Amino acid sequence: MRARAKIPGGRARAGYLPVIAAVDGLRPPFGLDTIEGRMSAVTDSARLRLLYELGCSFAERSELHELIPFVVDKCREALKAQGISVLLLDSERNELYFPYVAQDDPEIARRLSAMRFPADRGIAAEALASGMPVKVDDAQHDERLYRGIDRDTGLVTRNLLAVPLVSRRGAIGVIEAVNHLGGDPFSDDDLNFLETLAGGIAVALENARAHGRLKESEDRLRQQVAALQRDVARGDLFPEIVGASAGMARVFKLMETAAQSEITVLIEGETGTGKELVARGIFRASGRSARPFLVVNCAALPETLLESELFGHRRGAFTGALRDQIGMLRAADGGVIFLDEIGDMPLAMQAKLLRFLEAGEVVPLGEAFPHKVDVRVLCATNRDLRLEIARRNFREDLYYRIAAFPIHLPPLRERRDDIPLLASRFIAAAGERQHKHIRGIEPQALDLLSRYDWPGNVRELLNEIERAVAVAGEGDVIGSDNLSPAITAFAQGLQAENAVAPAPGPAVEVAPQAPVAGPIEPLREARTVFEVGHIRKALRECDGNVSQAARLLGLSRVSLQKKMKALGLR
């Protein structure tokens, strides 16, 4: 390792060796006298001791968000400066921003942290482009000064030092000292000190970034593996989408179209219709199929946890944040994230999601600067989002952003032709899971399944078949007696309706007629009467508690409320 390193522009940087040695985790093999000899421009022994301490801190502290604030605070004290800032280059946007600021005015520090400005404007930009340190004694009369910073922060820049941060990969930013507190401008010794320190900061930043990339990759893989494990655990519930009805044919066509583009898709449908299956089908048929597919249930997490789950957080960002978490959006980078039940997302989170969809950037909790992410977003809801907009529960601008390509999944009662196919597939899968051979299902039992309204949709049918297979014996055929009380009660209602005799009246001779095929005409009315009585009985048993009655009936609370309204029970 050389004692003097070249930076772009050919200027030698004295004192680079002890800082680099400390960054590499090595204790400098020489005393302070040797350091002082190599750094003839820096004569203050206190600063020499500080450089040594900072060099050691580079080796001891691996967390960048702890290391750099510590360094800039110490640097501000040593230079007697009003403020020290580390500006980093966002090469994609060609902008400089302030991730690390030490200021004696907290309000100025806050405003600086929120600022970005073009990387080709200002004194810092000149230092970055030339690779040479810049010392300005009268900034207000220097035409290179970018006055937008003073205007937006309220700061008056009198004098400053700007030193490029140069790593092995080139210039990555600038460290800047503003306004010497002694009244006089900064000295050449101040510039030499800051230049010496800049080398260590640049290497520390590069090392920390590499460490961060590895850690982020590890976190991303951990979340992806967890998602895959969840998929394996539940993946055999719906081996594939089954459907031959006209309604499902339309869904398949829309899925094919959606898979060929990057458009944001909103999948609408009642609970249990298979919205996640459609999202996975779009993902598997798309160009992102080799990348991650992650699922977030927006209804399952409170707002604070949902924000952390999506956007990630820094350690210490809130109580219980014991380690950094990159969040699901960054974990799904390059792939697809499926936001299920987005209609249940809190309004504050809706605003943050909209910003992400518009900018493609993630700002973790406790962090000030964004991370660019390439993720396709698929959403699903069982709510009428237009109605939620009218109720002010959902943002209209977010709705139009996510509903660019809507896909409506029909409920099972509107695709009864698919019930025999689904039942056959579920019987085979349930038999395999339960290590039991089931020879099929009786026509009478299948007829009952096909007539039932299935308020829980495909998920309810799946659970019904799972139960029937468990009740049936080895080698049996599933019959009506293997079905659940909800189905058998429905069957009894049908039998009672069929057994109703006509009211007595005068005998009238009629010509013999062939028996009428199919159900008799009043069946719908009888079914309505049965449902009204059955729901009233459930409500009585639950003392009028709709949520408990819904669980008793095997419905969601929303489905039961809709049915009660339709039947005039509300």
Image (cartoon, helix red, strand yellow):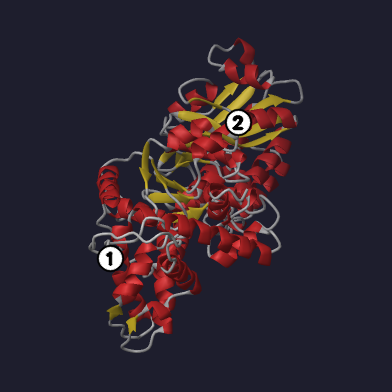
Image coordinates of residue 108 in percent, x first then y, are 70, 27
Q: Say left or right for 373 vs 181.
A: left
x and y, in percent, of residue 444 in the image: 33, 73
Density class for disc 2 (Cα within 10 Å; few <14, some 14-19, many ≥20) is few
* Badge 1 element: helix
The answer, for residue 207, to whether it is visible in the render is yes
Marks 1 and 2, the one that precedes in the sequence:
2
Q: Which residue is mark 2?
A: 114
Residue 17 can be seen, yes or no: no
Query: How crowded is the residue under tag 1: few (<14 C-alpha within 10 Å), some, or many (20+)?
Result: few
Mark sitting on residue 421 = 1
- Please tell me whether mark 2 sits on a helix, a strand or a loop: loop
Is 403 in front, or is 492? 492
At 47% across and 51% down in the image, what residue appears? 340
Q: CA distance from mark 1 to mark 2?
A: 58 Å
Relative to 314, residue 405 above or below: above
Amino acid at dot 1? Leu
Quarter where residue 449 is shown: bottom left
Q: Residue at x 46, y 37 (%)?
A: 357
Is mark 1 in CB contact (under 8 Å) with mark 2?
A: no
> Residue 267: image x %, image y %?
40, 46
User: Residue type at mark 2?
Assistant: Ala
Discs 1/2, front: 1
Front residue of this view, candidates 17 and 239? 239
Task: Look at the picture and state if 103 lies above or below 430.
Answer: above
Name the residue nearer the viewer: 563 or 536.
536
Residue at 67% of width from left, 53% of height from top? 316
